Amino acid sequence: MTNTTTRLSDVIVPEVFVNYMTKDTTDLTEIFKSGIIATSGELVSLLAGGGRTFNMPL
């Protein structure tokens, strides 16, 4: 049995992936415009803090 590493570049083909990103972005924009969901300033600041994990308050 060989020990191999799967890399992101092995599974994502940019020419295919970009179509999903464009569609998802359009769908999410419509959801934001409708007011069903909104951004959270607290979450944005946690995401901007760096690192791989953070704890959300209960």
Image: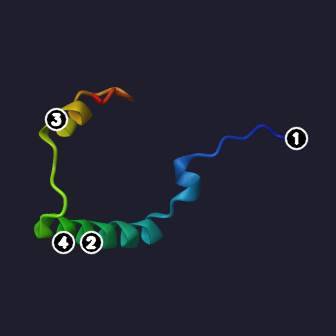
* Quarter location, residue 14: bottom left
- Scheme by which the image is coloured: rainbow
Q: What residue type is disc 1 on?
A: Met
Work out which quarter of the rendered image holds the N terminus and state it: top right
Q: What residue type is disc 4 on?
A: Glu
Q: Which residue is mark 4?
A: 30
Query: For residue 42, which numbered disc appears in the image?
Result: 3
In terms of sequence position, does the residue under pointer 2 or pointer 1 come before the other?
Answer: 1
Mark 3 vs mark 1, CA separation in Å: 47 Å
In terms of sequence position, does the residue under pointer 3 or pointer 1 come before the other?
Answer: 1
Query: For residue 1, which numbered disc appears in the image?
Result: 1
* Residue 18 placement (x, y as % from top left): 37, 68
Q: What residue type is disc 3 on?
A: Glu
Mark 4 vs mark 3, CA separation in Å: 23 Å
Mark 2 vs mark 1, CA separation in Å: 43 Å
* Residue 44 placement (x, y as % from top left): 19, 39
Residue at 12% x, 64% y: name it.
35
Mark 4 vs mark 1, CA separation in Å: 48 Å
Q: Which residue is mark 2?
A: 27
Q: What residue type is disc 2 on?
A: Asp
In terms of sequence position, does the residue under pointer 4 or pointer 1 come before the other?
Answer: 1
Q: Secondary structure at mark 2?
A: helix
Q: On screen, 34 above or below 6? A: below
* Residue 26 placement (x, y as % from top left): 24, 72
Residue at 24% x, 66% y: name it.
28
Q: 10 Å neighbourhood of mark 4: few (<14), some, or many (≥20)? A: few
Q: Secondary structure at mark 4?
A: helix
Of circles 4 and 1, the one toward us is: 4
Query: Does the CB distance between marks 2 and 4 fall below 8 Å?
Result: yes
* Residue 6 placement (x, y as % from top left): 63, 46
Query: Does the CB distance between marks 3 and 1 fall below 8 Å?
Result: no
